[in-house]
Image: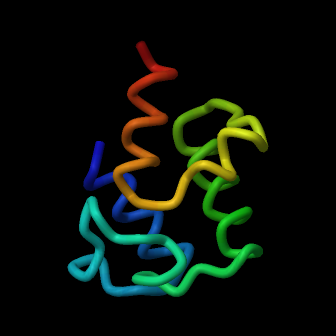
Amino acid sequence: MFEKIRTIIAEELEVEKESIEKSSKLDDDLGADSLDAVELVMAIEEEFDLEIDDSDATKIKTVQDIIDYLESVKN
C-alpha cells in the first residue's frame, strides 16, 4: 500500500518518489499547500474507490496518516 500511495503523492505533488517516507509531512517535507492537499485526497479517493470525510481529511498530516486511514476504512 505504501508504494501505491507514494506513487500518487509523487504524481500529485511533483516530488521525487524516493524522497517520500512514511514519516514525511505533506506540507513541511513535501511542500503541499491546501489546494495540493485537496487534490491529493481526491486522487486517493479515486484510486481506492472511497470517500474521505472532510473532517478526516483535515487530520491527515503525514504519509503514515494516509496509510493508517486507508487501513482503518478497508477493514
x and y percent of residue 16 in the render?
32, 86
In the rendered image, which quarter is residue 55 located in? Answer: top right
The answer to whether residue 75 is above or below residue 26 is: above
Residue drawn where x is 28% and y is 64% of the image: 23
The answer to whether residue 66 is above or below residue 38 is: above
User: Looking at the rendering, in which quadrant would you find the C terminus?
Assistant: top left
Q: Nearer the viewer, residue 54 or 50?
A: 54
The answer to whether residue 11 is above or below residue 5 is: below
Figure coloring: rainbow
Q: How many marks?
A: 0
Q: Nearer the viewer, residue 73 or 43?
A: 73
x and y percent of residue 7 in the render?
37, 64
Q: Residue farthest to the top?
A: 75
Residue drawn where x is 63% and y is 42% of the image: 45
Residue drawn where x is 48% and y is 74% of the image: 11
x and y percent of residue 15 in the render?
41, 86
x and y percent of residue 40 in the render?
61, 62
**Residue 72 placement, left or right of 50:** left
**Residue 75 placement, left or right of 40:** left
Residue drawn where x is 73% and y is 74% of the image: 34
In the rendered image, which quarter is residue 20 located in? Answer: bottom left
In the rendered image, which quarter is residue 39 located in? Answer: bottom right
User: Looking at the rendering, in which quadrant would you find the N terminus?
Assistant: top left
**Residue 35 placement, left or right of 1:** right
